[in-house]
Structure formats: C-alpha cells, structure tokens
Image: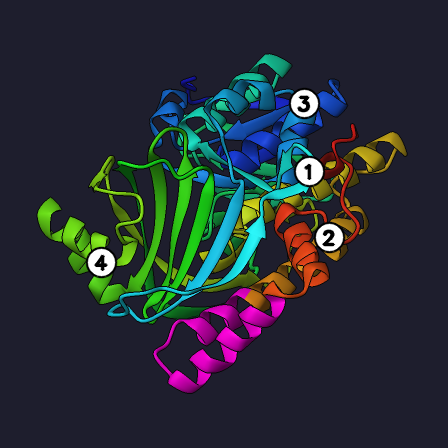
Amino acid sequence: MMVKAGKNTEMLDVVVAGGGYVGLSLALALKQADPTLKIAVIDPKPAESLSKDPRASAIAAAACRMLDQLGVWQDILPSAQPINEMIVTDSKLRDVVRPVFLTFDGETAEGEPFAHMVPNGVMMPALYEAAAGAGVIFHAPDSAETFRNTNDHVALTLASGETLSTRLLVAADGVRSKLRDLAGIRTVYWDYGQSGIVTTVKHERPHNGRAEEHFLPAGPFAILPLPGNRSSLVWTERTADAKRLVASDDFTFEIELERRFGHHLGKIELDGPRHAYPLGLRLARDFVKPRFALAGDAAHGIHPIAGQGLNMGFRDVAALSEVLIEARRLGQDIGALDVLERYQRWRRFDTFQMGVVTDVLNRLFSNDNDILRGIRDFGLGLVDRMPGLKTHFIKEAAGFAGPSPKLLSGEPL
C-alpha cells in the first residue's frame, strides 16, 4: 500500500516500525485481542516483496502454537518441514569421519515436533494478509524518520512527509535500529569476526526431517531440512573467508560446500542465492522508554549457533502483547513507563541469558584447540547419556522452559 505525503491527525494506539515477522505478528496479536485498538505498521519494503524472500526459518514449537492461535499456522503448515531429529558433531574440516556426540529426538510431545522449518516467503505473506484483514493500517513502502515524545503521545514523522500520532511506538526495525538510536538507548556490542552464509541446496537422498549441526573450527555449519530433497544452510566462517566464498563462482563455492556438507545425502547443488551477514552480539541496555519499546532484533542480536534469534523475537511479541492487552483491560495507559517496564522485566533477563549462552558456545566451539575440543566432546557425550538433561534442552529449544506468555502456550490473550 502506497502512502501519500500529508498530515494524519487521528490518534493511533500503537505504531510498529518494521514489517518483519515481529512487527506483523505483534500488530496481528494486538488487533485480534482488541479490535478497537488502532494499530499501524510502517515498513520500507512494499508488501509484494514479502513472498520473494528466499530464506527459511526454524520456528520452535511454542512459536508454532502462537501462530496457530493467531490463525495463520494452517496456511503455513503445508509448506513447513517438521524437524524429526537433530544430531551434533564436532570435528576438524580435514577429518574423514565425523562422530556424532549428541542426538535429539525431535518431539516435545506426541505428534508435536520441537521445531519446523518454514519458508519466509510463505510465513510473511500469511502474517501480512491476516493483519491487513484484521484492520491493521499499513504505511509501505515508507519509514520512520524522526519522532518526538510528549506527555500523552508520540509525534512521528515518516520519510513520505506524513506525520502520525500514537500512544506507543514499537521499534521492530532490526539489529541496526534507527529508532533505538534516536531514543538514546545504548547497546552492548562486540563483533565475532565471523559471518553467516545462508543458502539453500538440493540433494539426491532424503533428509528424513533430520537437522545437523557440525561444529567446525571456523564456526558451526547447520543443515536444516526443507520440504523435498532440499536443505537450508547456515554456514559460519571467518568474515574474510565468507566474503571470498560468496564472491566466488558456483563451482568453487560448491567444492568448499561439499567439504563441509559431506556425501551422506548424495550429490548436492545450489538451489538459491547465497548471502553473508556479519555476526556479533548486540544487546540493548534498556528495552523501554516512556511511550517507546524495542522488540525483536532491535532489542537483541545474538549468534545463530542455537537457532534462537527469531524465536526470541516471537517471545517478545507474546510478552509485549499480553502486557499491553492486560493494561488496556484495566484502563491503564499502554504507553506509560510502569506498564512497559512489566514487559522489560519479563524479557530482559531471558534475553541477556540467551546472549551469554550463545556467546560462550561460540567461543567454546569455534576454535581448533585440542584441549577444549576434548572437554566439549566429553560434555556432549555426557549429555547424550542423560535423558533428563536432553529433555530439558529440547524444552528450551522448543520454547517451553520457564513461565511462558499465553500465546506461546497456544492460549488466547
């Protein structure tokens, strides 16, 4: 939907900057729970570009329950691939044999895999269409340029020249959030010197729904199953090597890919574009200010080693929407700092904890130190022989550990 420059005097309840999975699902959750709320989403991408995203995402079971509660999972499910099993190996690149140190059964409960691989080009349009159908207002392509906070609202100026007034502004505009910086929220950040290469491959043999995480000296190499004989790859390399690989011709890239992928699924070939993005840890020191909240990557950017980045964003959505709807029902101001601090208390500790865990795992496994390798392999083998501990890790990966917001339990707000 194109917007025309002008002045909008209508007071909105929530404006979400960012039309990714976090922004769309938050707008949809709020509008479904309270149709009287006036919700707007601002996004620099046109709506028709959502179906062209070639990437895929691992959606944990708890997030699947939320998407089901929001009424979009049945549209996504036919294109989703359940993860039925996961194996973890630890080896050097030149090793002929990669011993499996850890295996996980893929179910949290009978008939419920702990995760599904979902094409972004299916998930994003489903969320958009549901949100638009529920009455969410879209300003796209457009972006937030500046905002000014007053006692009872936020005055927001868009790149198109339009101005909006809202009781709450939510920044879901990514790890390099412009609005976070404008709000004066500082971050903790360091660069890992690694980049993640993302692409899709076809292979001769079926994967049978098995995900693989190979810990190699340069970083983890994850093979994630997609429908058919296809897999999504998240391949971590040192940044200079990643740039060289992405810039290389297909033949060179596929030779390097085969060295890491192996031959267990037969012949492999590229089945999509390849991209590399820098990896680092970025955590916002505050998640909220008066009439302002961060969600998704704007609040936290972590290493993909545990595959939890997207699912942390869905947890933000579930927690923030529950806090706002409860406040609304109690007659409270949804933009008030004391209301927003409930969301911050709910999410900040979990976020910092996951940031620390992924940081430690990356430092422990992304190296060629034989002593550390012996320690970590002993630890992996120990976990593999302890069913109770494996069950705990599966619940963590599925998003069921600890107290969960209602949406992540499949309950309505």
Residue 149 at x, y percent in the picture: 63, 45
Mark 1 or 3, nearer chain start: 3
**SS for dot 4:** helix
Query: Can you say which quadrant of the picture contains the C terminus?
Result: top right
Q: What residue is pinned by disc 1?
A: 153
Query: At x 60% / y 41%, what residue is drawn?
Result: 170
Query: Looking at the image, which residue is at 47% across and 47% down?
Result: 174
Ranked by sequence position, the earlier of labels 1 and 2 is 1
Could you say which disc has been placed on residue 259 in the image? 4
**Residue that label 2 marks:** 401
Q: Residues within 10 Å of mark 4 (few under 14, many from 20)?
A: few
Amino acid type assigned to the residue bearing label 2 in the image: Ala
1 vs 3, front mark:
3
- Residues at circles 1 and 4 in contact by the CB criterion of under 8 Å: no
What type is the residue that disc 1 sits on? His
Counting other residues with Cα less than 10 Å from the Cα at mark 1, is it few (<14), some (14-19), or many (20 or more)?
Answer: many
